[in-house]
Amino acid sequence: SYELTQPPSVSVSPGQTARITCSGDALPRKFAYWYQQKSGQAPVVVIYEDSKRPSGIPERFSGSSSGTMATLTISGAQVEDEADYYCFSTDSSGNYRVFGGGTKLTVL
Amino acid sequence: QITLKESGPTLVKPTQTLTLTCTFSGFSLSTSRVGVGWIRQPPGKALEWLALIYWDDDKRYSPSLKSRLTITKDTSKNQVVLTMTNMDPVDTATYYCAHWTLSAAGIQYYFDYWGQGTLVTVSS
């Protein structure tokens, strides 16, 4: 099997920078995608292909990837950014499509 | 505008087979390089990918659940159906369907549009 590992929780004060990491052995060769899921809602993609931001996603959301770790950065986090965040990718063989375990972001 | 909606039973008994339907609009499953997938999320837990079907009828399943899953499509009805056999209380979850698309670089797919999800409870 293949796993993507995220920290269970990250907490920041409003206006601070939040960083959420995702580690996986295939990330040097595969893109990471990031999803935001607010309570009771379906996930929404906030970063695709490691660092690209879909239209409509605020500029404070950015992504990067280096080696076996991808990082979602929220610069100047807002209270409305409180949510669960999931990374998503695939293993090198393409057999496993995997979500990370999710990170609960608290902004208060 | 792409939309997807899941439908099916809200309650199933242990050992029964679950059948879920995803009805979508705004795209066609006869268009190359698109697909529809299913993802589930037990209450308070993480997302788990289950299955995919591509425009060309290629199918992929989560290795851990492959023996229990079947995914099919009806292009004329804009529907994708997922069946899961031998349901157990641990299968209680919100089940989502999502649009599967090739991202901009053209080398990897991802889920860009999701349905609202449907909660399925497994209990006798």
Image (cartoon, rainbow, N blue to C red):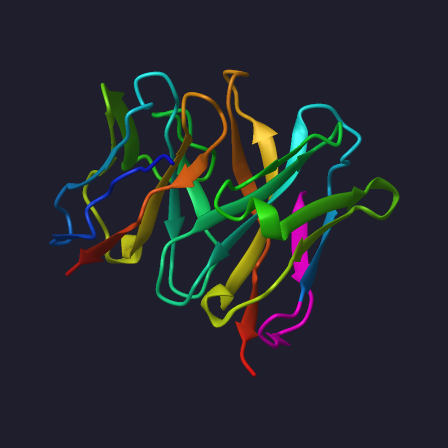
Q: Camera-side residue: A29 or A107?
A: A29
Where, by quadrant of the figure, is residue B115 drawn? bottom right
What is the residue that sits farthest to the right in this orientation?
B76
Rendering coords of residue B97 (x, y %)? 60, 50
For the record, the magenta segment spans: B1-16
Rendering coords of residue B84 (x, y %)? 63, 57
Q: Camera-side residue: A27 or A105?
A: A27
Residue at image location 15% in from the left, 53% down from the top: A14
Q: Is residue B114 left or right of residue B30?
A: left
Where, by quadrant of the figure, is residue A86 drawn? top left
Residue at image location 46% in from the left, 47% down from the top: A44
Q: Is residue B13 magenta?
A: yes
Q: Is residue A81 magenta?
A: no
Q: Is residue A1 left or right of residue B77?
A: left
Rendered-image quadrant of the N terminus of chain B: top right
Rendered-image quadrant of the C terminus of chain B: bottom right
Q: Camera-side residue: B90 or A104?
A: B90
Q: Camera-side residue: A41 or B117?
A: B117
Labels in figure, total: 0
Rendering coords of residue B23 (x, y %)? 74, 53
